[in-house]
Image (cartoon, grey):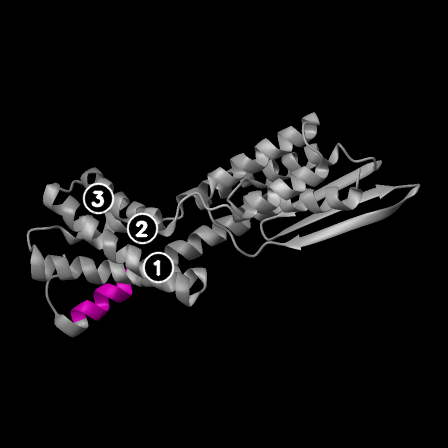
Amino acid sequence: MNEKILLEAVVLAGEIMLVSGAEVYRVEDTMNHMLRRSSYETTETVVFSTGIFVTLDDPVKEPMTLIKRTPGRSTNINRIYLVNEISRSFCRGDITVEEAYEKLKETATVIQYGPWLRALGLVGVPFCFAPIFGGNFLECVASGLVGIALAFADRIVKKVRLNDFCINAFCAFSVAVVALMIKNWLWQKTSVDVLIISSIMPLVPGVTFTTAIRDTLNGDYTSGSARMLEAVVTSLAVAAGVGGGMFLFQFLWGGILW
């Protein structure tokens, strides 16, 4: 077995899982299972929320170490599932390390939902959340319209390639402004609270917060703290965006805020 390719495949598997929102213990467990196919006597994996360290050591062989930084993170359960399936097939001996590496490279670029389906989700989530927050049918429709604005804002900032804080703040800003426009200029009987709260749900870092709790409970305090801070920063970005949108609308056009 080519140990160098194995090392690269293991690190790639860990990177895909980590940036897709998997817990640190799950990433390390998958990587350790794959490393059992190695002929090296000692294998070590250390995973943080922003980096992966893997070392292979043996008294009669040259040691190998690979470090990978993982700055970007999102939530993609499908990629986590695909990596686990490839890992299981490799550990059973159904595929070679070269085949596993090629499959992992394909998994890293797979897009389950295209831009139009993503946009549809950003419209559908506010529409479906509005009744949960006490909205009537009219407010569901209005929330869907705000969701359209959210989808446009998300598309724009992805092309500009801003950082995550600015992306969340701008999207939340757009939600607040459009919700207030609907409230003041289209349907005054709607509740702006329902429109804004239901429309920012796609921006709420619920998965990140849950993963941070699970990492902390599993003893990965560094990663748990980092993800908790990430969730807090995302929440602050959303709050700042909504507050900025409400302030700007009131400053420029006046009208009803609540």
Residue 138: percent from left, percent from top: 10, 45
Is 245 within the magenta? Answer: yes
The answer to whether the residues at label 3 and label 2 have Cβ atoms under 8 Å apart is: no
In this rendering, position of residue 93 left or right of residue 136: right
Amino acid type of disc 1? Arg
Quadrant of the snapshot with the N terminus:
top right
Is residue 7 rendered to the left or right of residue 165?
right
**CA separation in Å, label 1 and label 3:** 19 Å
Badge 2 amino acid: Ala
Disc 1 target residue:
155
Asked which secondary structure carries label 2, the reply is helix
Number of other residues with Cα within 10 Å of mark 1, as a class: few under 14, some 14 to 19, many 20 or more: some
The C terminus: image quadrant: bottom left
Of mark 2 and mark 1, the one earlier in the sequence is: 2
* Residue 182: quarter of image: bottom left
Q: Nearer the viewer, mark 3 or mark 2?
A: 2
Q: Quadrant of residue 25?
A: top right
Q: What span is in magenta?
A: 242-250
Can see residue 219? Answer: no
**Whole-percent x and y of residue 122?**
30, 49
Residue corresponding to mark 3: 127
- Residue type, mark 3 in image: Phe
What is the distance, in whole Å, between disc 2 and disc 1 at their CAs?
8 Å
Viewer-side label of 1, 3 = 1
Q: Is residue 64 magenta?
A: no
Task: Give me the disc on residue 119.
Answer: 2
